[in-house]
Each structure stands twice: as C-alpha cells, then as structure tokens.
Image (cartoon, helix red, strand yellow):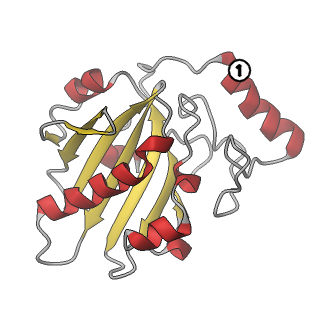
Amino acid sequence: MLAGCGITTSGSAEPASPSVESRVVDSGAQQGIRQTDDEGQPLPFRTTFPNRWNSGNVGTPYEPCTAASTALLRALDLDPTSVQDAASADFQTARGCGWRAQSSSRSTIDQFVGNQPRLEIYKAQQSATKNWQSDISISGRTVAVASDPTSPACDTFVESADALVITSAAVYDAGVALPQICDKAIAFTRATIDQMPE
C-alpha cells in the first residue's frame, strides 16, 4: 500500500502533538487494542494491531474507516461488507480502509492518512512517480489529483492538520478510461472532505 501510493517514512513530516501521542498510548496500553476512532465510533472491523494509530499517521484525527456511512458507500457503488483495513502490519504509516465496488470486484477505493509535509512539498517530492493533474477545489480546499503511470489508478490528496488524506481509485475492468477512474476518487473525496479537519 505504501509504495504504490508514494507514502514515505523518511521523517520529513512534523511530529504529532503530545496530546495526540498520549491518547494513542493511553488507549492502547490501558484498554487493550483500540477499536474506535477519536469520536468513539467503532471501526468496521476488529483490528489486531496495537499500533494501528502511531507516530506516522496521527497527524490528523480523521478516520477514513468511519467517515463514510453504509448509505454513502452504497450510493458510491461500494460494498460496505468488503471493507478492509489499509494496514497489513502493525505500526504501518498508512491508516485507513479500502472497499470493492458493488458492480465489479476489480474496482476499488482506498482512503487513508499518513503524516506528510505540506501538499506542495509532497507533490515536488513525488514529481517523478506521479502524473500530477491540475489541482481542483472542493469545499474551498485544494485537492491534488494524480494518476499512477504503472497502473489504472488515480489518487486525490488533501491536507488535514499535519497529514495528507489520500483517496485512491483503481479499476482493472477493460474499457474504463483514466478520467472515469479519477472521477471515482474525486467523488469519494467530495463525499468525505467536510469531515476532514483542516
């Protein structure tokens, strides 16, 4: 997940505030493995990773796994029961979820957060690995859009506190053009952006 989306752990991001760090430690150490977002909403799966929230991804309290309701997921042609944690190992930088499309198991949306530098700096750092399109504006916020030159995927990037929220759409069905794939990533971003703290 990290390599495909250009997330790095080079230490270029600013550290999370002590209050966020302490919440991560407290919730994990005193109550077992944390199973809820910062608002107390339960994750749509049971995580076995005690460090799912960690110094690489707590730059924003935004939790992609609880941001989209079942009704919203269905409206965006996503199967709520297909939800999967973005993390495949403990202490992973990317924190979020992925879903398969209801109409095709070869179409997916992933949304995750990772501590990163400001958007313009990140774009410059990733200039060789992404095909950047013109930025767009959603709810008055800058949203960067980029395609992946090695796969039929399109990503959006939004700043949220000291992190980036990345939404990645991939479609492996024949005959789906890149603009249509980008439209899927943009639609999911548009549907959730108001929940992302600035």
Residue 6 appears in the picture as rendered: no
Q: Amino acid at mark 1?
A: Ser
The residue furthest right is: 30
- Horizontal side of residue 43 vs 105, given as left or right: right
Residue 105: x and y, percent? 36, 79
Seen at 71% across and 56% down, the residue is 42
Seen at 58% across and 32% down, the residue is 58
Foreground residue among 127 and 144: 144
Residue 16: x and y, percent? 58, 21
The residue furthest bottom is: 103
In the picture of the structure, the residue carrying the numbered disc 1 is 19
Q: Secondary structure at mark 1?
A: helix
Foreground residue among 136 and 33: 136
Residue 23: x and y, percent? 75, 30
- Horizontal side of residue 126 vs 192, given as left or right: left
Q: Could you classify mark 1 by the number of other residues whose Cα lies within 10 Å: few (under 14), some (14-19), or many (20 or more)?
A: few
Residue 38: x and y, percent? 68, 40
Foreground residue among 106 and 136: 136
Residue 161 appears in the picture as rendered: yes
Seen at 62% across and 34% down, the residue is 54
The residue furthest front is: 139
Q: Quadrant of residue 50?
A: top right
Seen at 55% across and 18% down, the residue is 15
Q: Quadrant of residue 193?
A: top left
- Horizontal side of residue 171 vs 139, given as left or right: left
Position of residue 146 relative to residue 198, above or below, is below
